[in-house]
Structure formats: structure tokens, C-alpha cells
Image (cartoon, rainbow, N blue to C red):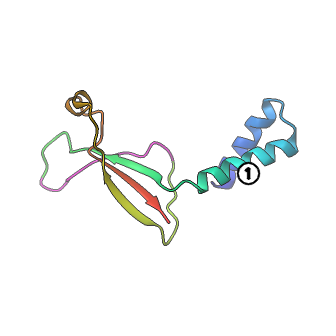
Amino acid sequence: MDREEYDKLLNEFVAEGVPQEEAHFLVAKKLDEKLNTQYHEISGLWRPKKESSKVAFEGYAKEKVKIPKGATILVFYNNTDNPELDAERKRPEYRVVWTW
């Protein structure tokens, strides 16, 4: 979380009527929860819509992602029991995450 994001969350809590000290605590708690998750999502990967000789998979980030130096990047199969999602290309074939 960078300073802009911290300030944005802080201002949201203060706008809701939370006292400044409590707002700082809530933002720090949220930051701690985010940092202590085992896997941090980067993107899903789908086969490209057009056949390509250069592109194997494509994806997009839902939010700004910062990957720390030294982090391990993993790609998981995204198995599901719902074939309808596969047919509609709503479910990515792989999930890309980073972890420590």
C-alpha cells in the first residue's frame, strides 16, 4: 500500500465519522491483513481470443499490483466443476499470484 492509498482509506474512514486515531488504527489493521495473506493475486490468464503465434495467454490486473523484490511468482491451474464458466470464457485457465 502506497501513501496515496493509505491517505484515501484514512479519508474514507474519517468521512464516515470515525475519529482520526481510530481511522489510523483501522487502516493499519487492513494493511496488516493484506500483508499476511499467503497468496496475493496478480491476474488470471485466458487463451487469447484470436489465434496468435506469439501470445500464449492474456490477462488483466483488477487493481494496481506491486510485487516486492524477492517475491516468488506462482501460476496455479484454475480448476472448477462448472463447465458453463469454461464455455463462456469467464473463468481463467490459470491464476497468477505472488508470495514470500
Estimate the x, y position of residue 69 in percent, counting from the top left.
50, 70
The residue that mark 1 highlights is: 28
Q: Is residue 61 magenta?
A: yes
Q: Is residue 40 left or right of residue 46?
A: right
Q: Is residue 88 left or right of residue 53?
A: right
Q: Is residue 94 above or below residue 84?
A: below
The residue that appears at 80% across and 47% down in the rendered structure is 24
Determine if the magenta segment contains residue 7: no
What segment is highlighted magenta in the picture?
Answer: 53-63
- Mark 1 lies on a secondary structure that is helix
| 38 shown above or below 25 | below
| Label 1 crowd bin: few (<14), some (14–19), many (20+), radius 10 Å | some
**Which residue is found at the position 70% from the left and 42% from the top?**
8
Counting labels gives 1
Type of amino acid under label 1: Ala
Query: At x 76% / y 39%, what residue is drawn?
Result: 11
Q: Quadrant of residue 48?
A: top left
In the displayed image of the protein, which residue is found farthest to the bottom? 70
Q: Main secondary structure of the magenta part?
A: loop
> Residue 4, image x and y in percent?
67, 50
Q: Quadrant where the N terminus lies? A: bottom right
**Residue 25: percent from the left, percent from the top?**
79, 48
Q: Is residue 26 left or right of residue 60?
A: right
- Would residue 9 appear left or right of 91 to someone viewing this image? right
Foreground pick, 90 / 7: 90
Quick one: 14 or 81, which is closer to the camera?
81
